[in-house]
Amino acid sequence: MAKETGQKLIAQNKKARHEYTILDTYECGLVLTGTEVKSLREGRANLVDGYAYIQNHEAWIDNVFIPEYTQGTWTNHAARRKRKLLLHKLEIRKIETKVRDAGHTLVPLSLYFKDGRVKLELALAVGKKLYDKRQTLREKQDTRETARAVAAARRRQR
């Protein structure tokens, strides 16, 4: 059997980038069962309600939806169980000190296969206020309008 290489996106949490200001990102592995991996290979997962936390110097993720494997039997997994994250001890300590600060949280951004292994992109984030969200949308709209104007000006020059 050939070894799998490259990256394949399984699920992405687009809402997180809108709701939070991302301060730092970490790539971590997950402790999964066989049926969870098979379900992920089918490209089925949802990160929207998921959150991560540090407990007893271990990183955990909870409320991430990985549906049951359709051909699984009694060995099937629970869809929304708490799963352990695989991070280095120093990374966990660093995250733990930052999360203790008021307003900081851990949010899953994306779930993907990297060289055949399931990885999770975890972000240290701060919640945005309503006016911050409006400002971000306004900036995005302004850059889109300037790009359109530049493209129109180039078309007129031809």
Image (cartoon, rainbow, N blue to C red):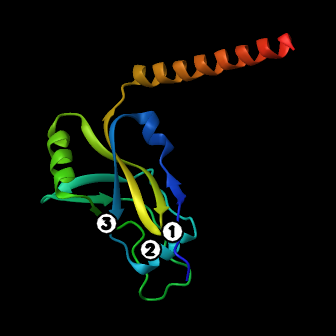
Amino acid marked by disc 2: Glu
Disc 2/disc 3 C-alpha distance (Å): 11 Å
Q: Which residue is mark 3?
A: 83
Q: Position of residue 84 (x, y in %)?
A: 28, 65
Residue bearing mark 1: 40
- Residue at mark 2: 36
Which of the two labelled residues, at mark 2 and mark 3, occupies the earlier sequence position?
2
Residue 140: quadrant of the picture = top right
10 Å crowding of disc 1: few (<14), some (14-19), many (20+): many
Q: CA distance from mark 3 to mark 1?
A: 14 Å
Classify mark 3: helix, strand or loop: strand
* Secondary element at tag 2: helix
Res 88 label: none
Which image quarter holds the N terminus? bottom right
Name which residue lies at 12% across and 60% down. Answer: 56
Give the residue at x 66% y 17%.
145
Q: Quadrant of residue 129?
A: top left
* Side (left or right) of 151 relative to 86: right
Query: Of the residues shown, which amino acid type is indicated by label 3?
Result: Arg
Q: Tell me if 108 is positioned left or right of 8 in this view.
A: left
Q: Is residue 152 left or right of residue 76?
A: right
Q: Is 107 located above or below residue 112 in the figure? A: above
Chain-order first, disc 3 or disc 1: 1
Q: Position of residue 64 (x, y in %)?
A: 40, 59
103 is higher (above) or lower (below) than 141: below
Where is residue 125 shown, x and y percent of the image?
A: 32, 38
Question: Distance of mark 1 from mark 2, alpha carbons?
Answer: 6 Å
Q: Is residue 60 above or below residue 101?
A: below
- Quadrant (top left, top right, bottom left, bottom right) of the C terminus: top right
Q: Residues within 10 Å of mark 3 (few under 14, many from 20)?
A: some
